[in-house]
Amino acid sequence: MAAEAIACASCLAAGHKHIVGTGVCPTCGHQEEPRGAFKAMQHRGPTTSSLHFEAFDKGTCEESAFKAAFAFAKIMRERIFVADLSLVESHEEFDTNDQSSRHIYGLIGDAPVAYMRWRVLQQDGTQCVIME
C-alpha cells in the first residue's frame, strides 16, 4: 500500500481520523478532495447558521443507515461525555438501550452541538419516556 493511502487526516467536523486515499469516509461520509484532504458533507438542511436536528432509530432506518448514524453519534458521545466532561467511563457510555432508543443530534451547519437519546418504557401498565 502506498504511504499516502495509509496516512490519516483529522476530520474537521468530528475529530476522528480519516484514511487518506479512500474517497469517502465510512464513518461520517465526508468526501475526499483530490489532494487527500477531506471536506465536510454537502449541507442539505437549513442555512448553515441554523440549529437543526437529525433523528434516527433502528426501527425506522435501514441497517446500514443506522450503523453510519450511530457511528457518528458514538464519536460525539465519546468525545463529550467520556473525554471532555469525564462523566462516565467508555464502557459505561454504551449499553443495550442504544438499540431500542431514538437518537437525536443537533447541528449548526454541519457541526455537532447537541445529543440525546430517548425510549418509551411500559411500567405497571403506564408508558413513560426515558430521556438521556
Image: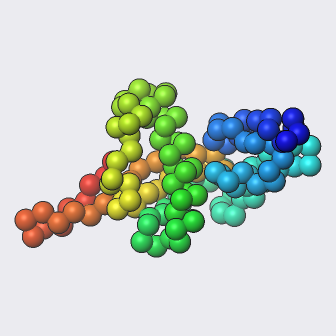
Q: Is residue 108 left or right of residue 4?
A: left
Q: Position of residue 74 (x, y in %)?
A: 50, 46
Q: Position of residue 85 (x, y in %)?
A: 44, 28
Quarter-of-image position of residue 91? top left
Q: Which residue is drawn at the image coordinates 75% and 58% (left, top)? A: 42
Q: Nearer the viewer, residue 41 or 91?
A: 91
Q: Position of residue 98 (x, y in %)?
A: 38, 54
Total tally of numbered discs in the picture: 0
Q: Which residue is drawn at the image coordinates 81% and 53% (left, top)? A: 23
Residue 131 visible somewhere in the drawing: yes
| Residue 29 in the image: above or below residue 78 | below
Q: Is residue 7 left or right of residue 60?
A: right
Q: Which residue is drawn at the image coordinates 57% and 65% (left, top)? A: 65
Q: Nearer the viewer, residue 72 or 106?
A: 72
Residue 48 visible somewhere in the drawing: no
| Residue 100 in the image: above or below residue 19 | below
Name the colour scheme.
rainbow
Q: Which residue is drawn at the image coordinates 51% and 49% (left, top)? A: 73
Q: Is residue 108 left or right of residue 118?
A: right
User: Most extreme residue toward the left, as rendered?
Assistant: 124
User: Most extreme residue toward the right, as rendered?
Assistant: 34
Q: Nearer the viewer, residue 20 or 86?
A: 20
Q: Position of residue 129 (x, y in %)?
A: 25, 60
Q: Quadrant of the N terminus?
A: top right
